Image: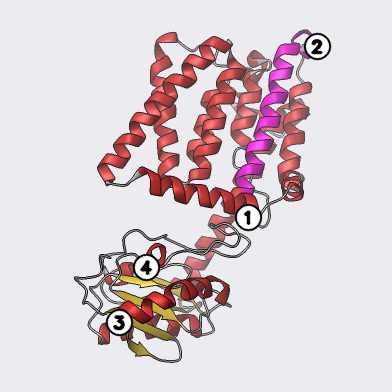
Amino acid sequence: MSGLLVLFVQSFVNDLDARPERGYIDHFIAALLLNKLFLIKISGLVVGLAIVMVGSILRGPFWRSLVSISVVLLFLVVMMAIDFVITGTSLFPVIHEYRMAAQARVGSNSALDALWSASRLWVLGVVVLIALYSISWPGRKSNKNSLIRCFLITAFYWACQVVLNMSNGTESGDLIFLAPAAAIAVVTWTDTSHTAAFWDRLWRRFHPGRLHEITAREVIPLLILAFIFVPEASASLRAVKLDFLISSGTTKYMTVSANKGVTFKILHADKIIQGDYFFYFYRAIHAIEDSGASRETIANLDFMNPFPALFLATAPKGVWVWWDFTRNRNVPIGYRPSWQEIIGDACIVTEPKQSPVWSVSYSQPLINAVEPHLAIAFTLIYEDDWWKIWKHNGGCGATGG
């Protein structure tokens, strides 16, 4: 989100002091941010590319916009090529996974979902505030071009925010993280001299004796910023409170660890666990250790695979990091994965028989897809009420096919 914020400001603000010689530096920075988004979240890259392209076109002129977009794309292609060379990753499998994820997201949303997301209170409230700011500045009638740009920026912010909310699968639909960047961009297309005077030594405006001098228009950008900062600050305060309760011993937690890799804590207050969450992992950890397989390549037939990190072991190659067959799916409706996509070159496969962490809707499609191959190429070496653990028949040096 920080990268998208920077791209939005860089692409849409009316930078009256921009120097032509900074053009290539700005293009390089934009490409660098887009490359980071590519490595972090593909939906962020799609939105980021749209921001760069639409922002360049709105700032015009058109021919210069095309040149700018072309330079950014050239830088981006070079950076992405370096990514693939350094990591040794193949291009086509990545494209295949991203295409399936896009199909999954599109297939699980409809036009009604988009309308619902666009009409959520906080998103719609920010859009209305930015629109009110756009039409409220002095001299707006004599500068219709700037007014049109402001409304285009507002509409584009609205569209980007809806796409981000839907692609992230948020239930509330109230993520409005791009709002400050949109507000800043709109402010720069209005009366900049008046705006600069207001923000200069802003703290003096909040003196009790001068509050009457602040206009509604001047409050709007501050209100938009508050929509972002207040919830984030409240979340941080809740985290500080929780840390205090844990450190003081008021709130208890369970520690899940294999004493080798990562360690994570589960709060007793978490309704998911009721003790089962804790034992779910520890049953598997002890079974893997007892079988002497803690250093082997381990795959897990569930939502995600914590065992390589818990044991500091090698993760399977060629597999998806996580699977979701629910409404927030990352695979198309009706998609049946192959066993190679699920376990890759794993020597050890853990199969949950019951899962207090995730529902059976996550694990059952994976189990159904892998079971025929497990029956042929693997041997069941452990089973209890919680888990089945399989080991490759040819030994852990012969799992490459």
Work out whether mark 2 precedes mark 1 in sequence or the reverse, and give the earlier one.
Answer: 2
Q: CA distance from mark 4 to mark 3?
A: 16 Å
The coloring applied to the image is: secondary structure
Task: Single out the residue that lies furthest toward the right.
Answer: 141
Q: Check if residue 324 falls in the magenta segment.
A: no
Q: Check if residue 148 falls in the magenta segment.
A: yes
Q: CA distance from mark 2 to mark 4?
A: 64 Å
Asked which secondary structure carries label 1, the reply is loop
Residue flagged by tag 1: what amino acid is it? Answer: Thr
Q: CA distance from mark 3 to mark 2?
A: 73 Å
Which numbered dot is residue 343?
Answer: 4
Q: Position of residue 20 (x, y in %)?
A: 44, 9
Q: Is residue 190 above or below residue 237?
A: above
Work out whether mark 3 precedes mark 2 in sequence or the reverse, and give the earlier one.
Answer: 2
Quadrant for residue 115, please give it. top right
Q: Is residue 235 above or below residue 401?
A: above
Residue flagged by tag 3: what amino acid is it? Answer: Ile
Whether the residues at callouts 4 and 3 have beta carbons within 8 Å, the answer is: no
Q: Nearer the viewer, residue 54 or 172?
A: 54
Asked whether, in this view, residue 50 is left or right of residue 306, the answer is right
- Residue marked by disc 3: 288
Asked which secondary structure carries label 2, the reply is helix
Q: Is residue 325 above or below residue 24?
A: below
Q: Position of residue 303 (x, y in %)?
A: 48, 68
